Image (spheres, helix red, strand yellow):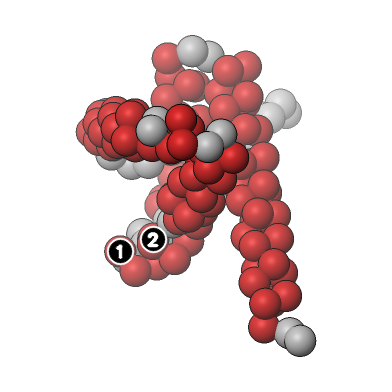
């Protein structure tokens, strides 16, 4: 590496070397690895969301159950919007980055940090939901 001046500014040689090192650390996920690592969010939403909706509609009685089809249509519409949005983000940010990258580029630093923090909370809560569902399922296996 090239020497630097007394302050923390790196020379262009340092920057180029850092870019090469960062490129060497990148790892692309295969489709199977990506599903294993990133599908928990979608799977938990698909598994627990409709169940919670049906429980509420059943508790409301026959009038509540008559709303099952409109609620299903609304969910399908939201999924179409979500898939369209994801496709646009992937097209605009082919290198990845998700909500943080989009917010950083278009809204600034503070909103991007909020997006990153909300994703961390989302992943933590997904793990908590998965553990609680697993322990609830374990109850059924034990006498």
Q: Nearer the viewer, residue 71 or 76?
A: 71
Mark 1 crowd level (few <14, some 14–19, many ≥20, 10 Å Cα): few
Q: Check disc 2 and report its element: helix, strand or loop.
A: helix
Q: Residue reaching furthest bottom?
A: 143
Q: Is residue 85 above or below residue 107?
A: below
Label 1 – label 2 distance at C-alpha? 5 Å
Q: x, y (%) of residue 19?
A: 44, 44
Q: Quadrant of residue 38?
A: bottom left
Mark 2 crowd level (few <14, some 14–19, many ≥20, 10 Å Cα): few
Q: Check disc 1 and report its element: helix, strand or loop.
A: helix
The residue at 68%/30% (across/down) is 8
Q: Quickly name the residue at label 1.
A: 31
Q: Which mark is residue 111?
A: none
Q: Residue reaching furthest top?
A: 107
121 sits to left or right of 53: right
19 sits to left or right of 140: left
The residue at 58%/18% (across/down) is 111
Q: Which mark is residue 34?
A: 2
Q: Nearer the viewer, residue 75 or 107?
A: 75
Q: Are marks 1 and 2 in contact (CB under 8 Å)?
A: yes
Q: Is residue 49 visible?
A: no
């Amino acid at each position: 590496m090239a020497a630097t001046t007394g302050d923390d500014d790196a020379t262009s040689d340092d920057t180029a070397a850092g870019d090469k090192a960062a490129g060497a650390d990148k790892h692309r996920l295969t489709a199977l690895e990506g599903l294993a690592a990133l599908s928990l969010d979608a799977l938990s939403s698909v598994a627990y969301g409709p169940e919670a909706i049906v429980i509420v509609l059943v508790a409301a009685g026959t009038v509540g159950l008559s709303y099952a089809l409109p609620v299903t249509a609304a969910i399908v519409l939201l999924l179409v919007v979500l898939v369209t949005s994801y496709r646009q983000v992937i097209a605009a940010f082919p290198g990845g980055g998700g909500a943080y990258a989009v917010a950083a580029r278009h809204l600034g630093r503070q909103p991007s940090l909020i997006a990153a923090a909300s994703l961390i909370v989302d992943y933590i809560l997904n793990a908590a939901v998965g553990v609680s569902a697993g322990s609830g399922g374990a109850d059924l296996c034990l006498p």
